[in-house]
Amino acid sequence: MRGLDIRGDGGYIIAPPSVTDTGAYQWSIEEDAAPLPEGLLKRLNGKPKGNGKASSFDRESILDGVPEGKRDDALFRYACSLKRRKTPRQEAEVLVREVATNCTPPFPEDAALEKVARAYNNPEYDDPADEPQQRKEYPFIMFSDVAPRLDTTALIQGIIKPDSFIVTYGESGSGKTFDALHRDLCIASGNDYFGRYADKGLVVYLAAEGGDSTRNRVYAYRRELFPSASFVLVPYSIDLLKPGGDVDGVINLVRELESLTGEKCIKVTQDTLARAMAGGNENSSEDMGALVANADRIRHALGCCFEFVHHAGKDAARGARGHSSLRAATDTEIEISACNGVHVVRPTKQRDLTLGDEFAFTLRQVEIGTDARGEVITTCVPVPVDSHEAAGRKHRPTTQERFAIEVLQEAFRGHQQIPPREIIKEPSNRLNIGKNVCPLPAWRQLYVARKGGDGTSADTSERTFRRNKDSLQAKGIIRVFNDWVWFLD
């Protein structure tokens, strides 16, 4: 730019009132200096910012070359620094190639260019100072103004609240997709779900797994159970893990569907969680946290429920597969299991609602047509049944739950007490006269100690204890109230 002298790092200028041996410097043109652009002034006055992806380093020394063992990291950080300095990519490639040649031994040119491509193609390595800083507005309610929310109705009575985060899980063949579809179609059609009323609204079902079989099931549901429903099937594999995935695409799609149907979307279901985080690690807190955060983005942007259909872990007693942060974020967790041809639906976690309800269904086979060779194509629809038909499933504990019962019996022998007044005063506790109770901490401590003797970590023991405690209570085997526990008759 004409009239503008640019100096790099380490450069300097001499201007009035500097003095040398030959005299003082003076301005040759008596004009005021042009005002400094506001953006440049902010950058000069502001503190250097980093995003943790490429920290600052000695740019002068890197020009002399980098020894083996440090070349890969140094070249990438150099490329990131060039990007943040707004160096054109073509020029950056020349500079990085030059440094790569000076390395000991020389760094391969194609690998050096990959460093430039990675830095320039990934927005993670942009300079955060370039982004406009907007002041966030945080909602607040003064203590005296806090009022109960009484104007919201349940999405499904006693089971699902509006705008909540839901996880339905089960082993392969448990019928989890049949139940998820049944529940969503009850909402989309305004029909009762196992005798519980359902709010009516648009439901979008993202069928990333088993798209053809899901399509057949939806067709059978429409023909046999729900002639009309505000339901949209999306047979597509959605990426909810990566920063540049399908989150915005899903939000935009649902908004288009709302405009098309004239109805508000009140639930989005992703079947399955594993397909939504392809390439990710379900046991990683970072990956699972990113997945949950993206599901929350969809939920908050659309003001609707979001549900993952998920697989059970190797040990079904430990609940859904993957990192514990998934369960921590969940408002409603539902376990689907199968026994003797009966599929049992059992909520295992409720953040705000009451646990205890259990439902069951069998599957009725229906013909939906024939293929090109004349073979009959069939699928199934659910038929609600009495949950007690699940061959004693309600009262039969798993192996892990039987272990928890044994530990509780041991805790009773050493810590049982007469029920305190707080338990007796609560009518719902159904505590018979003469029945003693056990402090909950005594059971927990003994359980963790016994598990620790088997080599199980304390964190894992705590998680399995909570799940067994909740499932035993849901099955009607124990009752927990405040910090007390006892067996039910």
Image (cartoon, rainbow, N blue to C red):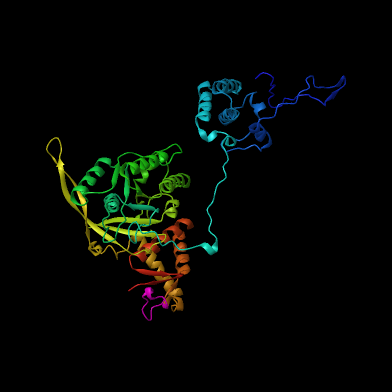
Q: Residue at x 54, y 51 (%)?
A: 138
In which image quadrant can residue 133 be found?
Answer: top right
- Outermost residue toward the left in this view: 374
Q: Where is residue 284 shown, x and y percent of the image?
A: 45, 46
Instruction: Work out whether residue 405 can be spotted.
Output: yes
In which image quadrant can residue 12 be found?
Answer: top right
Along the line of sight, which residue is nearer the eye, 228 or 260?
260
Above or below, 188 against 42 in this view is below
Judged left or right of residue 45, residue 72 is left
Above or below, 345 against 15 in this view is below
Q: Is residue 291 magenta?
A: no
- Magenta part of the chain: 424-436
Q: Is residue 435 magenta?
A: yes
Q: Where is residue 457 shown, x and y percent of the image?
A: 47, 56
- Outermost residue toward the bottom in this view: 433
Judged left or right of residue 240, residue 102 is right
- Indicate the quadrant containing the N terminus: top left, top right, bottom left or bottom right: top right
Judged left or right of residue 138, residue 282 is left
Above or below, 26 against 296 in this view is above
Q: Where is residue 365 shown, x and y percent of the image?
A: 17, 50
Judged left or right of residue 116, residue 287 is left
The prevailing secondary structure element of the residues shown in magenta is loop
Q: Where is residue 413 shown, x and y percent of the image?
A: 42, 74
- Indicate the quadrant containing the C terminus: top left, top right, bottom left or bottom right: bottom left
